[in-house]
């Protein structure tokens, strides 16, 4: 995933000749921390405890995390997954789905009033579908989080660093809940 993301960022940079267009421009540390904290707070404090159970009930399914069963009490496996998640999901998925895809969708909806919303929702749909292995509930919730991340990316002035950090922390939290058997 990181290599695909680098290819996408390279294409955006070749098109625009701007590190800001592909989210790689360094932002203020404070701004990055605020966006990161906001996203982590929304996902861990709102989506996980409230939205996920609601979606489970509405879809009459549960997100399928059965493939992660071996993590329960297995610290080496959990740590390995956390490291992989930071590289593949936090860095790789953010490069692909935010730096590349959101740039393209924002441009695609250039003439549409409220294009940030259409781009974010479309990006969230694609992001959710890419997580189809989690079942219907997982697709819906991951799609909502993807739309939130897409909106935050565009609204923050394409602050990719805050999204990478937030994604990594959220995935670390998720692995920890699987390791401890909380999910």
Image: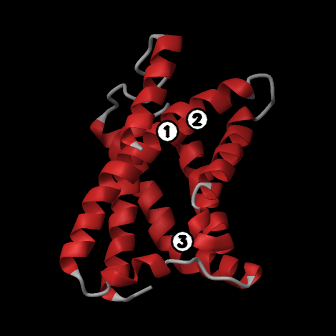
Say above or below: 152 vs 86: above
Rate crowding at label 1 as few (under 14), some (14 to 19) or many (20 or more) other CA atoms within 10 Å: many
Which mark is on residue 96?
1
Please state if 162 lies on the left or on the right of 76 as rendered: right
Q: Name the residue beneath numbered marker 2.
A: 101
Residue 70 image position (x, y, % from top left): 34, 82
- Dot 3 or dot 2: first in sequence order is 3
Q: In percent of the image, x 32 and y 66: which residue is there?
A: 172
Q: Is residue 108 visible?
A: yes
Q: Nearer the viewer, mark 1 or mark 3?
A: 1
* Distance between the alpha carbons at the discs numbered 3 and 2: 26 Å
Residue 50 image position (x, y, % from top left): 59, 78
Rate crowding at label 3 as few (under 14), some (14 to 19) or many (20 or more) other CA atoms within 10 Å: few
Determine the image quadrant of residue 145.
bottom right
- Dot 1 or dot 2: first in sequence order is 1
Determine the image quadrant of residue 182.
bottom left
In the image, 17 versus 78, the foreground residue is 78
Looking at the image, how many numbered discs can be counted on the residues? 3
Q: Tag 1's secondary structure? A: helix
Q: In percent of the image, x 64 and y 44: which residue is there?
A: 123
């Amino acid at each position: 995933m990181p290599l695909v993301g680098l290819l996408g960022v390279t294409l955006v940079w070749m098109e625009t000749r701007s590190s800001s267009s592909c989210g790689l421009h360094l932002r203020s540390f404070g701004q990055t921390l605020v966006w990161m904290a906001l996203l982590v707070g929304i996902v861990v404090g709102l989506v996980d405890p409230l939205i996920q159970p609601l979606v489970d009930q509405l879809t009459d399914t549960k997100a399928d995390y059965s493939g992660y069963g071996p993590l329960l009490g297995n610290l080496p496996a959990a740590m390995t997954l956390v490291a992989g998640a930071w590289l593949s999901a936090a860095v790789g998925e953010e490069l692909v789905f935010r730096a590349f895809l959101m740039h393209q969708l924002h441009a695609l909806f250039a003439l549409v009033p409220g294009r940030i919303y259409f781009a974010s929702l479309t990006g969230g749909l694609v992001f959710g579908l890419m997580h189809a292995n989690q079942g219907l509930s997982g697709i819906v919730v991951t799609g909502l989080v993807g739309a939130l991340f897409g909106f935050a990316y565009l609204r923050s002035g394409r602050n990719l660093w805050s999204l990478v950090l937030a994604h990594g922390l959220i995935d670390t939290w998720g692995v920890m809940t699987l390791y401890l058997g909380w999910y």
